[in-house]
Each structure stands twice: as C-alpha cells, then as structure tokens.
Amino acid sequence: MNRKYFLSSIIPATLLLHSLKSSATVRSETAASKKLKIPSYLVAGDTIGITCPAGYITQVEIEPAVAQMKSWGFNIVVGKTVGARDFTFGGTDQERLTDLQEMLDNPQIKAIMCARGGYGAVRIVDQLNFSAYRSSPKWLIGFSDITVLHCHINSNYRVASIHSKMCNSFPTDWTKAEPIQVDTINSIEKALKGEKMKYTAPYNNNNRMGSAQGELIGGNLRCIENLAGSISEIETDGKILFVEDTGEYLYSIDRMFYNLKRSGKLAKLRGLIVGCFKVKPDDEGEAFGKTLTDIVLEKVKEYDYPISFDFPVGHQRANFALKCGVQHWLDVRASGTRLEEI
C-alpha cells in the first residue's frame, strides 16, 4: 500500500470525526448556557393536538382522553396518525414526521399530546424542523419513548416539556377508576394550566437524605442510554435526574447505569430520583445477584447528593406529570420525599 496515500485518506476522516465531536460539544455548551423557555400555560379554549410519533393507537382508544381534555375546557385536534398503522408504528416514518411537524408549526395548537409510547420517535427526530417551535414554544406531553423528544428539546432548544401519561392511560370509565388513576390524570391538567407541582413519596430505607435545587430532567432509562453520543444526548450537570423503565433484566439495568456513570452523567447531579422499574425476572440459572437498589447505590457511592427511591413516576398507575426543564426542590428525609416545583 502507498503509505503516503493511506495517511492522506485517514487524516481527513479523523478531522471530520473531530469536527463532529466539536460541533456536539459546542451545541451542548451553547444550549446549556441558555435560559430555559417555559411555554405559555393553557387557558379555556386553547387547543391540544394528539399525534402518534411512536406506536400506533386507534381512534376508539383515544376517545376517553379526548372527552376528558375537552372537559378541562380545551379544544382537541386529532392528527392523521391516530388510527394509522405501519406494523408497530402509528403510520410510516414519513406520516409520523409530517403529522408531528404540522402540529409543531401550527400556531393554533398550544400543546401536543403524544397518544402513546412504544418505539419510533428516534426514527424521525433528526428530520423535524423546530424553527417555528423555537420562536413560539408549546408543551409536548408524554413519556416512555417520548423521552427521546424531551431530551432532544431540552438539550438543543431549552424548552420545558411535560413527562406524563398519554392517551392510552386515560380510564374508559371514570366511576370505576382508582383514586391514583384520577390523581395522575388530573395532574396533567394542573401542569398544563400552570399550577405549581408538588409530590411526595414514602420513606425508603435505601434513600440518601439531603436537599437540593435544580432543573428536573429525565425519563426512560433505556431511551436516555440510547441517546448517548448523539445530538439528543441528555445534559445532567447541575440537574435533578429522574429515571424509570420497564421490561428490562437486572443485568441490563446495571449496564445502563454504568453507561450513565462512565459518560459522566451521574457525577455532577444535584439529586437522583428513581421511579418505577418493572424488572424482568432472571432467566433460569442466570441470576444476576444484585437488586435494583444495589445497582443504583453502587454507581453513586462516591457522590453525596440526595437519592429517592420508589418515586411515583414510570410505567405504573402512579405516574404523575413532571415538568421537564423546570426548577424543582428535592427534599429527602426520614419522613419521606418531597419534590416541589419552584
């Protein structure tokens, strides 16, 4: 091989990689330095759009959510992806991209409710144009796979969003709904209308006591891990991080927490909130040997910020609306945990 030619072909590629890394770093530093924008809170008569950026859902399945949000005084616009299906997705990538883009661009729509999670947001996030959204921010609502959008928006555009239940979690019969279901759904209305959010969690003997103030950010741990190294990567320095997940083996959760630790995402936190983790049982003969709390505490043993376990967020009925990006006060004591929006 011609060594001179080989080196000349390698150097430009190396420079390109360095340039891409530098661009990501500049993006992170620039975004992190910007003041967070909080979209206007909703009032009676405002419009909420419903779309499916990830998994599919039927028109019938969203009707309880539509009826409830109308009872809050809002108008509802149902996107073209509701009822559409492309295998597991709520329509093709192009259909989901177009539907969400139209809602981001429509000045009459003041909030966007993602109908359900599943998988699919990462397939379209890089094609979205946030120009209109940046000049006129609006609330984006959802959780699970929608963590991709929460992280992308927070890291790149510094706009607050709402991590909460979606249309597939609204009860079909409110008279038979459990109190916790009612409370969590009503927390979405409170968040959208600008009420200061306040939550508590019972004492857990694995908690680490202490208090902290910081921007609240987080979501589904698998999604957060998958975004590492991308333009949508979560920014955690000086923030209160909350995480949750479902259907993962303990060894997989251990690997994800190692990702957070090795990438520096745990080092400069103000506080850590561990929500619901629905753990998949170990395969026979493949016991991992550590609990969820073992996994978490092992990764944060050298840090001294407060930690709260069993917080009411995640894939469970006790999944309250949290305002991502907004300043909160976390207080972990022997009497329990308090999380309050400032």
Image (cartoon, rainbow, N blue to C red):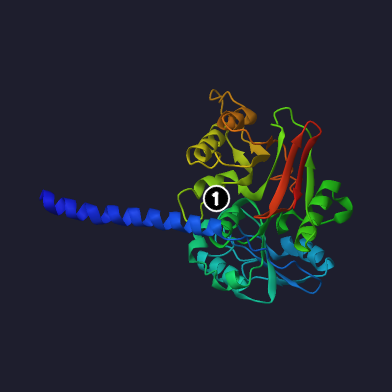
In this view, which residue lies farthest toward the left?
2
* Residue 248 sits in quarter: top right
Where 131 sits versus 119, above or below?
Answer: below
Please name the residue that numbered disc 1 is placed on: 235
Residue 121 in the figure: left or right of residue 11: right
Name the residue type under label 1.
Answer: Glu
Q: Residue pushed farthest right?
A: 175
Q: Nearer the viewer, residue 230 or 269?
A: 269
Can residue 94 be seen in this snapshot?
A: yes
Task: Tell whether 114 sits left or right of 42.
Answer: left
At a point 54% along the width and 67% down the height, the residue shown is 97
Q: State the image coordinates of residue 167 (x, y, percent, origin top left).
A: 72, 59
Residue appearing at x 48%, y 37% in the figure: 262
Q: Is residue 123 above or below residue 2?
A: below
Which quarter of the picture shows residue 91? Answer: bottom right
SS class of the residue under badge 1? loop
From this view, report whether residue 232 is shown above or below residue 100: above
Q: Nearer the viewer, residue 216 or 79?
A: 216
Asked where in the image residue 12 lies, by quadrant, the reply is: bottom left
Q: Residues within 10 Å of mark 1 (few under 14, many from 20)?
A: many
Q: Position of residue 145 (x, y in %)?
A: 59, 53
The answer to whether residue 99 of the structure is visible from this angle is no
- Image coords of residue 13 (percent x, y): 27, 55
Residue at 87% x, 51% y is 176
Of 135 and 310, nearer the camera is 135
Q: Residue 298, percent across and down? A: 57, 28
Q: State the count of labels.
A: 1
